[in-house]
Image: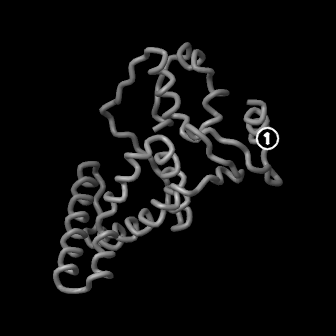
């Protein structure tokens, strides 16, 4: 996760600094690739980093995950194709819809229950405690939204980031699609840098 990365200033300058990285949607991935290309060693810290996103609306949740999915599709397309398997309750619900019956409904229930138990245990290890009854509907909704985003990311070539629209290119390189009205001076300068590249 980009916000939790640490590197030496000399290494950051060697890869082109923030000016270079600001051109990419997946700046953290590109940063790691560039450091490795220069012979640097990458290490993962064993600490858990909190990522607090507040209480996003369903639209915000879908938009954020669609943006992340677009990144993963462009960075590792083969691995991304397998990600559909990471939404098992949505897949099981599709089986219920295509072949209704006790067996498919029972399998769906077991899958959703297993997901709920695993999510509850994982959160408890992190000190988060909530009612087990909240997990099934929330996990099903999450899986349905992520299943919807999965194919969209493959065909999506534009994203909106902080009010500006960009086209995603190779390695998640961003090209400004248009400059919206009221765009801040910072984003105007960023847009000018991208055009100059």
Residue at the image point whose x is 16% and y is 81% from the top: 103
| Front-lying residue, 168 or 13 | 168
- Numbered disc 1: secondary structure: helix
Residue 155 lies left or right of residue 40; in this view the side is: right
On screen, 52 above or below 90? Answer: above
| Front-lying residue, 50 or 192 | 192
Where in the figure is residue 45, as x and y percent of width and height? Answer: 34, 30
Q: Which residue is mark 1?
A: 188
Residue at the image point whose x is 45% and y is 60% from the top: 150
On screen, 120 above or below 144? Answer: above
Residue 111 lies left or right of residue 54; in this view the side is: left
Residue at the far right in the pictured view: 181
Quarter that holds the N terminus = top left
In this figure, which colouring scheme has been used for the structure? one colour
Residue 36 figure quarter: top left
| Front-lying residue, 193 or 138 | 193
Where in the figure is residue 106, as x and y percent of width and height? Answer: 18, 79
Residue at the image point whose x is 48% and y is 40% from the top: 75
Residue at the image point whose x is 47% and y is 27% from the top: 33
At label 1, counting other C-alpha atoms closer than 10 Å, the crowd grade (few under 14, some 14-19, many 20 or more) is some
């Amino acid at each position: 996760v980009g916000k939790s990365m640490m590197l030496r200033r000399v290494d950051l300058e060697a890869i082109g600094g923030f000016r270079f990285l600001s051109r990419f949607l997946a700046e953290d991935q590109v940063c790691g690739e560039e450091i490795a290309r220069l012979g640097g060693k990458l290490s993962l810290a064993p600490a858990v980093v909190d990522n607090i996103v507040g209480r996003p609306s369903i639209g915000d949740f879908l938009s954020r995950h669609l943006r992340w999915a677009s990144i993963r599709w462009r960075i590792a397309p083969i691995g991304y194709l397998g990600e559909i398997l990471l939404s098992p309750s949505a897949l099981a619900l599709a089986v219920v819809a295509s072949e209704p019956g006790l067996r498919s409904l029972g399998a769906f229930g077991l899958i959703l229950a297993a997901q709920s138990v695993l999510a509850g245990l994982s959160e408890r290890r992190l000190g988060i405690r909530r009612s087990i009854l909240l997990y099934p509907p929330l996990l099903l909704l999450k899986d349905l939204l992520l299943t919807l985003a999965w194919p969209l990311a493959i065909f999506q070539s534009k994203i909106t980031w902080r009010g500006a629209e960009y086209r995603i290119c190779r390695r998640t390189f961003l090209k400004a699609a248009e400059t919206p009205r009221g765009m801040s001076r910072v984003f105007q300068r960023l847009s000018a840098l991208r055009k100059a590249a």
